[in-house]
Image (spheres, rainbow, N blue to C red):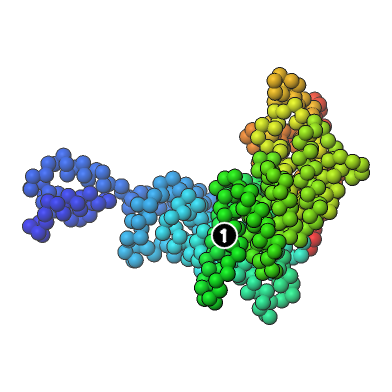
Amino acid sequence: PTSTLTPATSLAFLSTKDAVLDPSCMSHVAAATSSGASQTEVVNTLIKSYSNIPGEVALLAGWLKELQGNTAEHKSSVVGAVVESVQECLLESFTEDVAKGILNMDKTELVWINSMLKEEAWMKMLVRLRASHKDSALLTYFLTQMSKAGHHSLLHGQTDNFGVFHGLLGHMLSELAAARQGREEEARRARARKACLSAPRTFCYGKAQLERLLEDPETGDVARRRFKDLRDELDVATLTGDLGVDAEGSEGAGEADKRKATELSLYLSDLRKEAEGKKRRKTGEEHDDGLAALLYDVVRLRALDDPQDEAKLQKLNSVVSSAPEAGVARAKSEPMATITFLECMFDPKKRAKSADTFKACVSYVSKVTGSDAAALGDAARACEELEALVKFVPRMEGEGPEADVVRAAMRSWVAAAGIMIWSRRFTGGDFPEGTSYPTLVPGVLSLARLAAQTYPSECTAGAFDVVAQIFKQKPTLGGGKDGETGCTEKQNGAIKEQCLRFFLYVLPVYSRPALNFLTEQCDGAGNLDESLIRYFVSYFNKAFPGPFPRDFVEEFEKFVNNPRVVQALGKAGAGAVKVSRPNLVVKEGI
């Protein structure tokens, strides 16, 4: 009844969505105007609240009925176009207020949710929405329900929600156990590896699950070997800093990956430090050699990108050198500390200032990694001497840093990894503008090829990062610093071609990151022009006649179908050599 309505409640009602369509609307209008509210205020309130969603839905339903036609194909295309348009609208207009409104709806009004979670197109849209609304409780609920329903293939990359990650990891490990030997196994292991390295808790949980499966007598021999390989790769990744190398993406260890590595190290270090303190308190053990605190300090300073305290580095090496086996194992559990010591040996900007600290770094890395101390020292000294040269060609025989660095790399994969640290830093910054750029870079690229060739499992990712960095560089052609002659167009072309030969070399073992990087370089202002595309494809045709595994063909087709690649391969004459499109024949079982 109108007598029970108040002006405040009536105005509040009139401001709700589509209040004008409610049968009681005029009663609320009367109550509001009778108590002093102006007609203009009431009308404006109704206009602002009007959305006519029911009318729009009815209109859309009418259009669909008229457009669908009689054939199933016609109906499918019309519905698909409508769904796509609605999804784009949702992606643009979704806000947290909208999400809260949905969460506050009555359960009887939410029957459409179950329908959405049965359609792949809608589930993909929800995953896309969640990528830009990480904190949305509604979207997190949707993804959790998708995981429970077993839609894991749509959830790759959604590792920040633990409930989703739990189901996703189980699905990935099942896929890994059942994969065909070869490229399919490698691709699925890389995908699981990436998911586990996405955050500290996923790393810890992934390692714990792998250890549980390795100890389970029900785990088959093939699955056990594959799970052990994945566990070992996780350990190597934390040592080399190779976090976030995306089996589906295009980049290696960039700034985001460095942050992930730092976050992971600090998280694990903090956990270990706390656990050791609890253990000492529980056992009544008072002795503390300071190893945990020293390791934590070294990792913390590296995380903050602050200079290291060389006295602490020497002390840490002294503690580890005199520690029993348990102490060395504790040092091994802090991979970022080991990387810090490697950087103090190889990184031109972080190199140890004193000879004593340098010796301590060599000793620490050698003891923790079990590598050849002489090879580490020789490699680091050779890299420093190479910086003074204007040209070098790596070689095995003879004297000088050009030979020393190669022989050291051949003796130890850790030395080769250190050389890649030096290569990445040495060729970064404004190095492309230096006059020695065109004469030094070929030697660095040769070292990267040597590291990847000699230690494919341990050094391919680091070598790839070095080569990718050089390929992306754009030196000023014909003019270096102080007006001196720099890199010529011919020299720059030769450097780019040498990079492409490296990518071809690692293609059998590192195809997805390599091809995705090259595809990225085809777009926009990328460095892969038409002549380089023809160069790469012509060498590919000679080196890889096929047939190929299906997953490799799917990856390579993304590259050759890029518009710039299609255009480059379609040219002939006028200085362009006709290059045929690769014959990507699939052979199952390889």
- Residue at (64%, 72%) from the top-left corner? 211
The residue singled out by tag 1 in the image is 293
List the single residue furthest toward the bottom. 217
Residue 413: x %, y % from top left: 78, 54
Most foreground residue, 520 or 384: 384
Placement of the C terminus among the 4 image quadrants: bottom right
- Residue at (76%, 65%) from the top-left corner? 181
Q: Amino acid at mark 1?
A: Ala
Residue 260: x %, y % from top left: 57, 53
Residue 130 lies left or right of residue 297; in this view the side is: left
Residue 275 lies left or right of residue 15; in this view the side is: right
- Residue at (80%, 31%) from the top-left corner? 390
Residue 394 lies left or right of residue 75; in this view the side is: right
List the single residue furthest toward the right. 397
Q: Quadrant of residue 539?
A: top right
Residue 583: x %, y % from top left: 80, 47
Depicted 141 relative to depicted 377: above or below: below
Residue 162: x %, y % from top left: 51, 64
Most foreground residue, 411 or 20: 411
Whether residue 213 is visible, yes or no, is yes
Most foreground residue, 404 or 541: 404
Residue 203 lies left or right of residue 545; in this view the side is: left
- Residue at (68%, 80%) from the top-left corner? 217
Whether residue 168 is visible, yes or no, is no
